[in-house]
Structures are given as structure tokens and as C-alpha cells.
Image (spheres, helix red, strand yellow):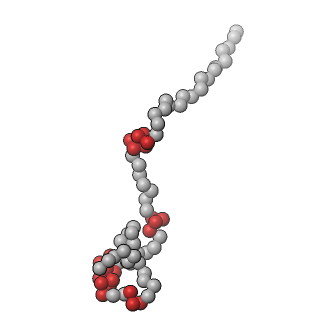
Amino acid sequence: MENDGILCQVCQGVLLASDRKAYTPARGRLIVTNGYCGGGCAERLPRRRVSAEAVRQQQPSMPAPQAPAVRTPTLQH
């Protein structure tokens, strides 16, 4: 059985069908094993974590920014 369009790409839960004829015994087994998709899976996905090394490889190497020199007034007596 082809599961494309039946299972959620994120949680692998069974998506609701628009027609009652779509509820076949095979779909019923998937519902029992995988459960239903609750919806909103894209919002629950953690943001992709990118390693610092991967970020460094993507960015051109530039010298680190330096703070401007601070002049301190000298006291005259």
C-alpha cells in the first residue's frame, strides 16, 4: 500500500480522510499503529540546529570586529 498522502511527513500519524471510503482496513491498521496526526506539526518542529563549524565554513573569513579605542581624559594638576 502506498502511504503517500496518508501519513503526515513530520509525525508519521495518519491524516484525516476527506471521504469515508478512504477508511480501508489497511488505513485502519496504520491508525492503530501510528495514531492520527494531531495537526500543527510544522509549528512543533524544532528549529534546525546548525553547528558553529558549519556556519564558519559558509561565511567568508573576515577579521573579528574590534571595539573603537576609548580616550580617557588625563587630569592636570
Q: Nearer the viewer, residue 15 or 72?
A: 15
Where is residue 67? Give x, y as percent.
57, 28
Q: Residue furthest top?
A: 77
State whether residue 36 is above or below residue 71.
below
| Residue 32 is at least partly visible in this image | no
Residue 51 lies left or right of residue 75; in this view the side is left
Of all residues, the one furthest to the right in this rendering is 77
Residue drawn where x is 47% and y is 70% of the image: 40
Which image quarter holds the N terminus?
A: bottom left
Which percent across, then down, holds residue 18?
Answer: 45, 85
Percent across and percent down for residue 33 are 29, 78
Quarter of the image where one finds residue 9 = bottom left
Tally of marks: 0
Q: Nearer the viewer, residue 22 or 44?
A: 22
When the figure is inspected, residue 69 is found, relative to residue 17, above or below; the finding is above
Residue under the image location 34 percent in, 76 percent down: 3
In the rendered image, the vertical position of residue 61 relative to residue 41, given as above or below: above
Q: Is residue 1 left or right of residue 77?
A: left
Q: Is residue 29 visible?
A: yes
In which image quadrant can residue 25 be found? bottom left
Residue 22 percent across, percent down from the top left: 38, 86
Of 48 and 1, the residue lying toward us:
1
Image quarter in which the C terminus is found: top right
Residue at position x 49%, y 30% in the image: 63
Query: Which picture quadrant has residue 31?
Result: bottom left
Residue at 38% in and 77% down: 6
